[in-house]
Amino acid sequence: MQLDKLTPELRELIVNVLKRNGIDVLSKDIIEFVRIGVNRGYKSAIHSFIFNGERKIAIKITDHEQCDVDSMLHNRELTFYQWLSGYMEEPHADHTDLSQLLKFYGGTKCDTEPGILILNDLSHRICEHPCYITGYGVDLIFRIVRQIAGYQSAYLSSDKETTIGRELMAYTLPAEMSVKKLGEVQWMSEEIRQTLTEWSQPENLFAIQTAISEDVEGITPTLVHSDMWPGNMIFEEREEVIDLLAILDWQCFKIGNPLTDVASLLGECLTAEDRREHTEAILRYYVDEMSKRSHRFKRRFEMTYEKAAELLSSALRWPCVQLMYAVVLVPTDDIKDEGQTIGRLSIRLNELLSDVME
């Protein structure tokens, strides 16, 4: 089935999913079906779908005829949005905690037919991304951390369970591709190559993102996006300030180390100088945001600054791997400043490794 063209088969599939979720397409004449979000959603196609005059939604489609891993990732994201829908229906749900998540209208599993996710379309509000190569502003990091605290608090407040995400250990492609090319990165020592290779093993990556040390008591594993890199966030300009609009692509979500997503922001999106200078303040802000919401929690979550710092020290191995992906797989992003022998992202990775491995 062609996914970039609205064939009769695909249109019928979309219309049926909408109808099952209480949305009627009044006319068979679809006004618009246009590809958006190029280079987002990994291999999934995202389209703007306009119908019933001006009704506009986003449809994320995964081809069931590709590989099993693609289907698994789609189905994992569907699991997230089904959990989200269940939470939103709970009487005590605080919708303000989830203001930066896309609204979910329905979806189908990817197995014998294409997998579909139907979401609200925010493409008309997106502004140019802040440049993570030069580093995000610290104020923006604080605002994103507030959203992380929001969705983690929703999970901790919910009666609805979901799975930890062990099936994601089958998703090995970025790590495998990166490790094969580590020998081409001239500034890396053999010790660094071996360390990154070890951390990139599926079982080790899963543990880095999910495990909580026995020394950290009173902390229940919670919801983590676990792929919090700049390509999975969209931004808008509000009163001349760039702010987070939405967090996308939840196909790798897990129930794990609460500091996993904060670690990604600190390690990947800040310069080494800003990370070292502001980590304590950002961690204290995260702890405060979680504490404000803790009266709603139904799961044990007794977070302190000391516990957050301990969890972060373990989780920071993950942005090392994320930066490895960027340096090795997208070398054009690793821009060299005048007088430097290695690029900005290589410097950021090297400095982060130095701090994590000491």
Image: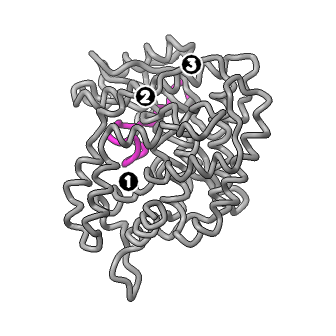
Q: Please tell me which residue is depicted at 45% across the width and 24% down the height of the picture.
A: 78
Secondary structure, mark 1, is: helix
Secondary structure, mark 3, is: loop
- Number of numbered callouts drawn: 3
Q: Please tell me which residue is depicted at 36% across the width and 69% down the height of the picture.
A: 334
For label 1, count other residues whose C-alpha is less than 10 Å away and answer few (under 14), some (14-19) or many (20+).
Answer: many
Report the disc number at residue 165.
Answer: 2
Q: Which amino acid is tagged 2?
A: Gly
Outermost residue on the bottom side: it is 339
Residue extent of the magenta highlight: 36-54
Viewer-side residue, 114 vs 216: 216
Secondary structure, mark 2, is: loop
Taking 86 as reference, is 203 left or right? Answer: left
Query: Magenta stretch containing residue 40, yes or no?
Result: yes
Q: CA distance from mark 2 to mark 1?
A: 19 Å
Taking 347 as reference, is 329 left or right? Answer: left
Q: Please tell me which residue is depicted at 79% across the width and 39% down the height of the picture.
A: 292
122 in relation to 194, above or below? above
Viewer-side residue, 353 vs 75: 353
Q: CA distance from mark 2 to mark 3?
A: 12 Å
| Residue matched to label 3 | 161
Q: Report the coloring of the rendering.
A: one colour
Query: Magenta stretch containing residue 131, yes or no?
Result: no
